[in-house]
């Protein structure tokens, strides 16, 4: 069993900042890519940022220059620092991780339960 637990969502004013965190736990053998996705009402889930085990990062164009993804391999955690927030960033943010468990030969993608981020004045 593997769990991803997110924290750090909430309400921010335009121009403000929030920091999301996600911790993976359970029967983890290794974690490859970790990432953050978001889904706004009426829209499809989209990639925000992802980071590999060697800390190579990719960002959606909408996140470049404003968001920073980081991870702590020792703690199996991934973070998303979001600055200069805009109303269009309002969405449910989901953590993802490609995890190989102690009882599997291949990795599978796991998801957190989601955390609401609302940007409004």
Image (cartoon, helix red, strand yellow):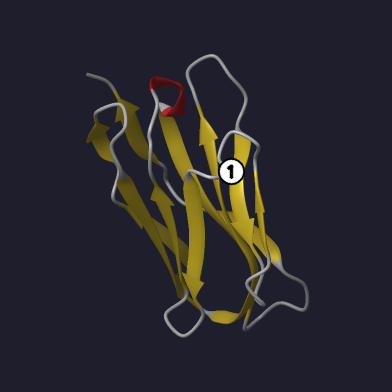
Q: Position of residue 7 (x, y in %)?
A: 30, 53
Q: Nearer the viewer, residue 70 or 75?
A: 70
- The residue positioned 42% from the left and 33% from the top of the image is 92
Q: Is residue 19 left or right of residue 57?
A: left
Q: Nearer the viewer, residue 48 or 67?
A: 67
Q: Is residue 8 left or right of residue 68?
A: left
Question: Eyeballing the image, is 63 above or below 32?
Answer: above
- The residue positioned 55% from the left and 40% from the top of the image is 63
Q: Nearer the viewer, residue 20 or 41?
A: 20
Q: Position of residue 5 (x, y in %)?
A: 38, 58
Image quarter of residue 47 = top right
Q: Is residue 2 left or right of residue 84?
A: right
Q: Given the current orientation, which residue lies at the most extreme top position?
A: 42
In the picture, the quarter occupied by the C terminus is top left
**Pointer 1 local density, CA inside 10 Å: few below 14, some 14–19, many at least 20:** few
Q: Which residue carries the number 1 mark?
A: 64
Question: Eyeballing the image, is 69 above or below 62?
Answer: below
Image quarter of residue 35 = bottom right
**Badge 1 element:** loop
């Amino acid at each position: 069993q593997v769990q991803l637990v997110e924290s750090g969502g909430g309400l921010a004013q335009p121009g403000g900042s929030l920091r999301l965190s996600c911790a993976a736990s359970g029967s983890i053998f290794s974690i490859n890519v970790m990432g953050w996705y978001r889904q706004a009402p009426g829209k499809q889930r989209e990639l925000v940022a992802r980071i590999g085990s060697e800390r190579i990062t990719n960002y959606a164009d909408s996140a470049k220059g404003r968001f920073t993804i980081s991870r702590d391999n020792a703690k199996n955690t991934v973070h998303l620092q979001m600055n200069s927030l805009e109303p269009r960033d309002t969405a449910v943010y989901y953590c993802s991780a490609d995890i190989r468990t102690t009882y599997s030969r291949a990795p599978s993608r796991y998801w957190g339960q989601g955390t609401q981020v609302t940007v409004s004045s």
